[in-house]
Amino acid sequence: MTHCHSGIEKGVKKGGNPIEVMGLLLGRPDPATPHTLVVSDVFALPIEGFETRVIADDDDVVNHMIALGESIERTRREKFMGWYHSHPFDVGVHSHCFLSQTDISTQLQWQRAEDPHGNPFLAIVVDPLRSLAKGVPELKAFRAFPPEYTNPVQNQCPNGEVIHEEQARLEQWGSCWSSYYELEVEYYMSRGARDVLSALTRNFLWMRALGSTPTSEAEARARYPDRVAKAAEGIQKFRPSSSGSGAGDLPSALMGPRAGRSTGGAAARSGGEKGGKPSSSAATGAKEEEDGGELGKSCQAVVEIATEKLVGNIAQISKKQLFSQS
């Protein structure tokens, strides 16, 4: 993260845009769970780039990597198992952690060279400007699909989400959204490092927590209309009907789980005693239970949205009372 931030400072000092940087990851697959890749250290490379091109002296980079690799073999048990680079683009609604066409080509070259030797190669993309704005590391880990691979799930994005709108896919994952997949990222540290970080956070970073309100940020505000519309759509399915009963009745839907279990269970027992099939009331009860579950999820979504807004407003009022001049 420090290396990525240095690219921002260097580019701004020159009066231009932040500079992309690149480095190598040191680590190994976890012996207990081979599908888990453990990154233990990083090493910066003398490469600088911008959004559309990379500036590097090939001879210097190759010589640097050779010397670094020889040093690692003598002093460390791990080996190079991935690479990282930054996307220092303007902060927006979505993270800039994605792989471009150039990134895909680079990652495929590494995978073809290292994967057959039991060293699954990893790509990490860091969004340093968003990390500074949010106060937390913004990074994602990826691997590329083989060129001949075809995803059986249409419009599935690297994180597994299916997005049908093409423009939304491009904005979030770039033009190569179907050529790579995201890996889950977990952070770990020693007990001593954890204690030190806890003390620093408690003694020195409390002002940062007071100075930010997540619910007031542009990203959170942009998501509210979609969340509200989705919850409203779920609740609209349960408009009261004129007969006062059925799946369209709101009180009946709220009581669906209890009524469904009672009716369905009795019908199943009755059918079993007579040697026949359960009556249609079992299916009705199951339907009511399902509807009640859907309504419960929609209501829970409304509660979550209202709670977030309430907590955010309380935080803003508290800050105003604490820091405004009397």
Image (spheres, grey):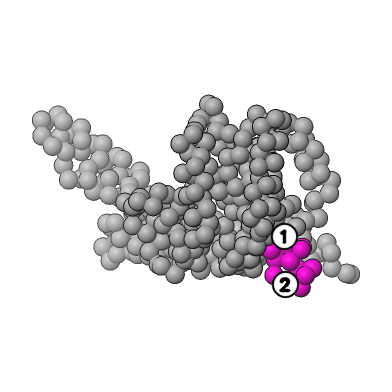
Instruction: Report the side of 259 relative to 91 (left or right).
Output: left
Q: Is label 1 in a helix, a strand or a loop?
A: helix
* Residue 316 appears in view: no
**Residue occupying the point 22% across, 45% down:** 283
Mark 2 neighbour density, 10 Å: few (under 14) some (14–19) many (20 or more): few
Residue at the disc numbered 2: 16
Q: In the depicted view, which residue is nearer to us: 1 or 161?
A: 1
Q: Amino acid at mark 1?
A: Gly
Residue 99 painted magenta: no
Q: Which residue is mark 1?
A: 7
- Name the residue nearer the viewer: 26 or 266: 26
Looking at the picture, does residue 76 appear above or below residue 248?
above
Question: Where does the magenta region start and end?
Answer: 7-19
**Mark 1 burial class by Cα count in 10 Å: few <14, some 14-19, many 20+:** many
Which sits earlier in the primary sequence, circle 1 or circle 2? 1
Residue 229 percent location from the top left of the image: 45, 67
Q: At numbered mark 2, what does the secondary structure look like: helix, strand or loop? A: loop
Position of 216 compared to 252: left or right?
right
Which residue sits at x=66%, y=32%? 73
Residue that extends furthest to the right in the rendered view of this protein: 326
Q: Separation of disc 1 and disc 2 at Cα?
A: 11 Å
Tell me which residue sits at (71%, 30%) in the image.
75
Q: Name the residue type under label 2.
A: Gly
Q: Nearer the viewer, residue 229 or 36?
A: 36
Residue 12 in magenta?
yes
Point out the residue furthest to the bottom here: 15
Image point 57% across, 57% down: which residue?
97
Residue 29 position in % (x across, y down): 55, 33
The quarter holding residue 207 reads: bottom right
> Which image quarter holds the C terminus?
bottom right
